[in-house]
Structure formats: structure tokens, C-alpha cells
Image (cartoon, helix red, strand yellow):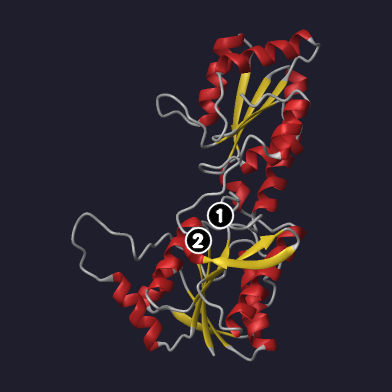
């Protein structure tokens, strides 16, 4: 059996560990042939595909990024104007010409949508959820999330000393698009005093009152963790908007920090390495069993899978009854 493997969308820690998990299981245990597809779905359009063997996998477990490269190519996305190439047809032709029996797609929500469309077109597909945002529906956790939370938590830890020394309000913006998972987990782990998430409405006046209330209790500084996807006015970035509003509401000196792409780079944590390895191995098991059109998923402590048709187009978001939100509020943390 010949399988192709690609990585699509944004990079994140653990992709290479996943590639390693898929390929080592496929080659060593099942005797499959594996082909690496460069630059995501663009590689299928350009026929940029190379054979992979044991030598291709050396040193991947702790390596950040992706050795296959990535892109945000969406071959099934409809455009308003005519295009010069029929991308779905080209993609399907490449798969046919290369005699690939299955395509393993590693990626986030956009990748899951494309993988589902491939499956609808008759291609044998198995996908693996990859995103630091942890917003892929159907899996408890996506690899990359733990690494991003660890990086963000370390940054928050470091801001405590600066905030304390200067008796300031420090606002730190973390990634996550429309989901507040990184802000919630790093904010709680880093001892944030105020945590603002896209999923939970906030009142800037209450935030100001919370900061003033802390001062009255003898706490002259505050740490505010904000998710990049919170609503703002005037097109301002989350941290800038919140910092300006806090200064206006309280008169306290406020500084902003945008953590940015550092959250997606570098080596994966031990947890993400193991999760990526498990997910990669399970993807190959699905292929061996002929179970296609499915996404590998973590359910509790078990690696399972769900139909791609159920995943595509859905987001997993933070809810107000999440344990960390409930416990945070009991401890006096302001969520807006």
C-alpha cells in the first residue's frame, strides 16, 4: 500500500513527531510505502512528492516546524471569479497518477474541511488534528496546544516580576483565533488576575473595578491575559485595546505585550511528543484496517477516531461551565 502524507495550515510544535509516528508505523510494522507531499495541498497540485524512508525520519521527535513544509492552499475553495486551473481535478489526477492509496492530512480546521471534501470525492483519507488553538471539534486535545500553553505560561511568569517591580498593570495577548483555550489555560497556570476570552462577554468597567479593588486590598499590580480574538473597537489589537481602556478607566500605568508567533515555534513538550506519536501511529492503524474518512481523536486517555463528516465546519470553544472558568471565578479571577 502507498500512502501520501502532508501538513497544511499554520506550523506548530509536534508536526514532525506526528510525521515520524505515521511513517515509522507504516514502514516498520505494516510494510507500507510512504511519500511526503511538500507544501500541503499545494504539493498535490504541483506534483511535489518524494519517497520517505527510515533515513528521512532521523531527529524528528523534538524538531519544531515541519520537514514537509506547509501552505494555506485550499483547493476546493470557491472563488468569485473564473480561475485558470481546476484545482480539485488536478489534485485528484495527481493522486491517481502517483497511485496513492491513502492521503494522511495533518492540520487544523481548514485542513479538516479539505480532507472531508477529498473523502467526498472518493479519496481514501485519514486526518490528524494539529493546532495550538485546540479548537478542532471532536478531539479533547490537539497536539501543539500543550507546547503553546507552556510558552505562554512562562511569559506570564516573567511578567509578574516586572509588574511587581514597577507596580503596573501588564496586559499579555496570546493566540487562539476565535477560541480562548490558550488564554484560559496559560492565564490560570500563570496566575492571571483577569482573563478575557472571545467566548465570554466582558465589561471594561468591571475590569477597571477589579483592578482598583486589587489595589485597595494591597495588591498594587495586576496581570491581564487576553485572547487575540476578543471583540475590540476601531480595529485595534486585543492587547492595545484593553491596555488603553484600563488606563482610561483606572489611571494606572499599563503596558502591553503581544506574544505572537513564538507560541508556535520551537520544540514540542514531552506531552505533545507523546500525543503526536500516538496519533500518528493510530492514523496508520486506521489505514491498515481500511477505515477511511476519519480523523484521529483523543477521547479521555484513549486515542480513537471520528468521521470527518462530523468534524468539518465545527469549532470547539470554551464554555462558561468549563472547570477552569468555574474554579477561577471561585478564586476571584475576573473573566469580564
Quadrant location, the N terminus: bottom right
Q: Nearer the viewer, mark 2 or mark 1?
A: 2
When the figure is inspected, residue 189 is found, relative to residue 68, above or below; the finding is: above
Badge 2 marks a residue whose secondary structure is: helix
Q: Does residue 66 appear to the left or right of 119 in the view shown? A: right
- Residue at coordinates 54% horizontally, 11% vertically from top-left? 248
Check the image and name the residue furthest to the right.
218
Determine whether label 2 and label 1 are within 8 Å by CB: yes
Disc ID at residue 216? none
In percent of width and height, residue 10 lies at 51, 56
In percent of width and height, residue 195 lies at 65, 30
In percent of width and height, residue 179 lies at 56, 42
When the figure is inspected, residue 189 is found, relative to residue 107, above or below; the finding is: above
Q: Does residue 220 appear to the left or right of 107 in the view shown? A: right
- Residue at coordinates 64% horizontally, 72% vertically from top-left? 280
Badge 1 marks a residue whose secondary structure is: loop
The residue nearer to you, when weighing 301 against 214, is 301
Q: Quadrant of residue 32?
A: bottom right
Quadrant location, the C terminus: top right
The residue nearer to you, when weighing 169 against 215, is 215
Q: Is residue 20 visible?
A: no
Disc ID at residue 310? 2
Q: Callout 2: 10 Å neighbours few (<14), some, many (20+)? A: few
Mark before the other along the chain sequence, 2 or 1: 1
When the figure is inspected, residue 63 is found, relative to residue 255, above or below; the finding is: below
Q: CA distance from mark 2 to mark 1?
A: 8 Å
Check the image and name the residue furthest to the left.
82
- Residue at coordinates 73% horizontally, 58% vertically from top-left? 300
In percent of width and height, residue 167 lies at 73, 16
Residue, disc 1: 137
Amino acid at each position: 500500500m502507498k500512502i501520501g502524507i502532508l501538513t497544511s495550515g499554520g506550523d506548530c510544535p509536534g508536526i514532525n513527531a506526528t510525521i515520524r509516528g505515521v511513517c515509522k508505523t507504516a514502514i516498520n510494522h505494516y510494510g507500507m510505502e510512504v511519500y511526503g507531499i511538500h507544501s500541503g495541498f499545494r504539493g498535490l497540485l504541483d506534483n511535489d512528492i518524494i519517497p520517505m524512508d527510515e533515513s528521512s525520519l532521523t531527529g524528528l521527535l523534538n524538531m519544531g516546524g515541519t520537514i514537509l513544509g506547509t501552505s494555506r492552499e485550499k483547493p476546493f475553495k470557491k472563488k468569485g471569479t473564473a480561475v485558470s486551473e481546476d484545482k480539485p481535478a488536478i489534485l485528484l489526477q495527481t493522486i491517481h497518477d502517483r497511485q496513492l492509496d491513502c492521503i494522511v492530512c495533518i492540520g487544523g480546521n481548514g485542513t479538516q474541511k479539505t480532507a472531508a471534501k477529498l473523502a467526498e470525492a472518493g479519496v481514501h483519507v485519514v486526518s490528524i488534528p494539529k493546532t495550538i488553538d485546540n479548537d478542532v471539534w471532536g478531539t479533547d486535545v490537539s497536539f501543539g496546544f500543550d507546547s503553546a500553553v507552556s510558552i505562554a505560561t512562562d511569559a506570564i511568569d516573567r511578567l509578574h516580576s516586572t509588574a511587581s517591580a514597577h507596580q503596573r498593570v501588564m496586559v499579555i495577548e496570546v493566540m487562539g483565533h476565535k477560541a480562548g483555550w490558550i488564554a484560559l489555560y496559560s492565564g490560570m497556570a500563570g496566575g492571571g488576575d483577569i482573563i478575557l476570552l472571545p467566548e465570554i462577554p466582558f465589561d471594561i468597567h468591571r475590569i477597571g473595578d477589579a483592578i482598583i479593588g486589587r489595589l485597595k486590598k494591597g495588591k498594587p499590580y495586576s496581570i491581564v491575559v487576553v485572547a487575540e480574538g476578543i471583540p475590540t473597537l476601531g480595529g485595534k489589537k486585543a492587547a492595545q485595546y484593553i491596555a488603553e481602556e484600563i488606563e482610561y478607566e483606572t489611571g494606572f500605568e499599563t503596558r502591553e505585550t503581544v506574544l505572537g508567533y513564538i507560541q508556535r515555534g520551537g520544540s514540542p513538550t514531552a506531552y505533545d511528543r507523546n500525543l503526536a506519536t500516538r496519533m500518528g501511529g493510530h492514523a496508520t492503524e486506521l489505514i491498515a484496517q481500511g477505515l477511511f474518512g476519519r480523523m484521529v481523536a483523543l477521547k479521555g486517555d484513549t486515542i480513537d477516531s471520528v468521521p470527518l463528516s462530523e468534524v468539518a465546519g465545527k469549532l470547539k470553544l470554551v464554555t462558561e461551565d468549563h472547570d477552569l472558568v468555574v474554579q477561577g471565578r471561585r478564586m476571584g479571577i475576573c473573566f469580564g
